Image (spheres, grey):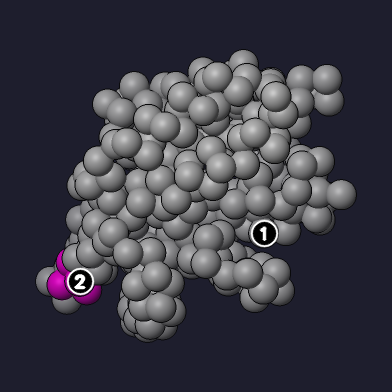
């Protein structure tokens, strides 16, 4: 049985929700041009309204990012881009579990390298006992937020695709610590995206088994607030991970209908919103079977 007791799909977080390609500045003219290219490509992906185009085109981008990183192995921005693309693609479009695990591991490793580049004392912290790891994470500041979030998101995807491995799932406490630190430093970062992870982690299990569904609901609702309702996936996760968990059909169906009726077009959210609408239709169609009369 998978960790959530409800099946692997609960951990399937759509592409571009895992994280956006975080591309701040760059230190040299050549690397700046490289990063600008990565940023332009990422924007094109995130603004795409046809997921199948992304599914077919993303592998070429994986190879492109690998080449960029090979030429600039210490470039923080490119490492974050690699972590984002690999983890996002593995978490959404790869059905073969062995391949998904391999790709997600590469994304996780890029994320760890990025965190190391952002703050040297974080290097290797992921291998420390939890208490030592937490001390390192709590010592990171606002400047490390992009790397902290990017590394945590990629790590979460690696856990997601290895959900049948209890040793991998045990790492979710570390991802939780990273996202809580992001929220503490800048809760509005990427329109509250860190709250999505906190919401997912809180609703993996029902309350009777140690889950904290009400905390999860609050986290998803905070994303809706911070994104001014533009992040439709937050509503889908609220319906799928919370409303189904607590058996609230009225909330579930209302949220699904709101998502289906919404305009999916929004800067850097069009792709994830398009995926959210498809998921909302599936959830609504199965609502009667799930909740009964």
- Please say if 268 is above or below 96: above
Q: Residue 137 placed where, x, y %?
A: 55, 36
Task: Specify which label sits upstream in the sequence, 1 or 2.
Answer: 2
Q: Is residue 36 magenta?
A: yes
In the rendered structure, the answer to whether residue 249 lies left or right of residue 186 reads: right
Q: Is residue 290 visible?
A: yes
In front of the other: 184 or 124: 184
Q: Residue 159 placed where, x, y %?
A: 67, 53
Q: Residue 151 placed where, x, y %?
A: 50, 51
Stretch in magenta: 33-37
**Residue wearing tag 2:** 37
The reply to whether dot 1 and dot 2 touch (C-beta < 8 Å) is no
Q: Secondary structure at mark 1?
A: helix
Tell us which disc is closer to us: 1 or 2. Answer: 1
**Residue wearing tag 1:** 161
Q: Is residue 151 visible?
A: no
């Amino acid at each position: 049985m998978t960790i959530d007791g409800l099946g692997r799909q609960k951990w399937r977080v759509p592409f571009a929700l895992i994280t956006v390609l975080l591309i701040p500045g760059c230190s040299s003219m050549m690397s700046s041009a490289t990063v600008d290219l990565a940023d332009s490509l990422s924007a094109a992906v995130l603004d795409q309204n046809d997921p199948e185009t992304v599914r077919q085109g993303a592998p070429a981008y994986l190879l492109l990012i690998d080449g960029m990183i090979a030429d600039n192995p210490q470039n923080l921005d490119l490492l974050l881009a690699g972590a984002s693309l690999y983890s996002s693609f593995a978490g959404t479009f790869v059905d073969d579990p062995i391949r998904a695990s391999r790709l997600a591991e590469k994304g996780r490793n890029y994320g760890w390298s990025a965190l190391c580049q952002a703050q040297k004392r974080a290097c290797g912290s992921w291998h420390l006992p939890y208490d030592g790891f937490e001390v390192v994470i709590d010592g990171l500041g606002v400047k490390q937020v992009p790397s902290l979030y990017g590394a945590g998101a990629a790590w979460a995807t690696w856990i997601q695709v290895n959900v049948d491995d209890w040793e991998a799932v045990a790492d979710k406490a570390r991802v939780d610590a990273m996202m809580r630190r992001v929220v503490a430093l800048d809760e509005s970062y990427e329109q509250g995206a860190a709250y999505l992870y906190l919401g997912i982690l809180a609703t993996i299990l029902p309350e009777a088994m140690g889950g904290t569904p009400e905390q999860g609901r609050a986290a998803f609702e905070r994303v809706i607030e911070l994104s001014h309702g533009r992040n439709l996936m937050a509503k889908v996760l609220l319906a799928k991970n919370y409303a189904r968990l607590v058996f609230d059909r009225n909330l579930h169906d209302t949220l699904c209908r709101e998502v289906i009726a919404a305009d999916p077009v929004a800067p850097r959210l069009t792709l994830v919103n398009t995926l959210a609408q498809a998921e909302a239709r599936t959830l609504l169609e199965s609502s009667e079977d799930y909740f009964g009369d």
